Image (tube, grey):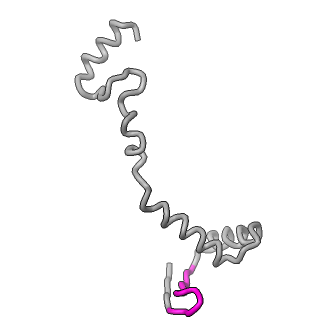
């Protein structure tokens, strides 16, 4: 991807981005459907992506309180797993 930034008065900075053909077709299609200029769609997409980037966490962190505790109620099945398996067999689970 090639980027070139320089100062303009109305919008601040201008960024030139070279897109692969498939991405350009998707952008043009979205532009037609949304009845917006491609540059508006790119600005919207960048705002959404960069805004969510700071809040993004790893998937495991989102469900950390659930890992290893589903069904058994035990927080960490890897610890003493043999004892947990034997207990489950005795209890008929």
Magenta-drawn stretch contains 78: no
Residue ID at (52%, 64%): 49
Q: In the orientation shown, which residue stands out farthest toward the left?
A: 80
Task: Please state the horizontal and vertical placement of residue 69, each as a whole percent of the image.
Answer: 37, 27
Horizontal side of residue 93 vs 83, given as left or right: right
Task: Please state the horizontal and vertical placement of residue 37, each as a whole percent of the image.
Answer: 70, 77
| Location of residue 74 (image quadrant) | top left
Q: What stretch is highlighted in magenta?
A: 7-18
Horizontal side of residue 42 vs 77, given as left or right: right
Q: In this picture, is 87 found above or below 30?
A: above
Residue ID at (40%, 33%): 66
Residue ID at (57%, 86%): 11
Horizontal side of residue 34 vs 66, given as left or right: right
Horizontal side of residue 24 vs 67, given as left or right: right
| Location of residue 84 (image quadrant) | top left
Dominant secondary structure of the magenta stretch?
strand
Q: In this picture, is 12 found above or below 30?
A: below
Q: In the orientation shown, which residue stands out farthest toward the front?
A: 10
Task: Please state the horizontal and vertical placement of residue 21, each as a whole percent of the image.
Answer: 63, 74
Which is more toward the observer, 30 or 64? 64
Task: Please state the horizontal and vertical placement of residue 80, each as a whole percent of the image.
Answer: 23, 23
Residue ID at (65%, 75%): 40
Q: In this picture, is 54 found above or below 59?
A: below
Identify the image quadrant of the C terminus: top left
Give the total of numbered labels.
Answer: 0
């Amino acid at each position: 991807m090639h980027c070139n930034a320089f100062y303009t008065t109305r919008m601040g900075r201008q960024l030139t981005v070279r897109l692969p053909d498939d991405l350009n077709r998707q952008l043009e299609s979205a532009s037609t459907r949304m009845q917006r200029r491609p540059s508006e769609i790119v600005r919207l997409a960048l705002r959404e992506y960069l805004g969510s980037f700071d809040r993004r966490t790893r998937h495991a962190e989102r469900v950390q309180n659930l890992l290893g505790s589903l069904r058994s109620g035990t927080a960490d099945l890897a610890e003493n797993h043999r004892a947990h398996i034997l207990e489950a067999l005795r209890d008929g689970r």
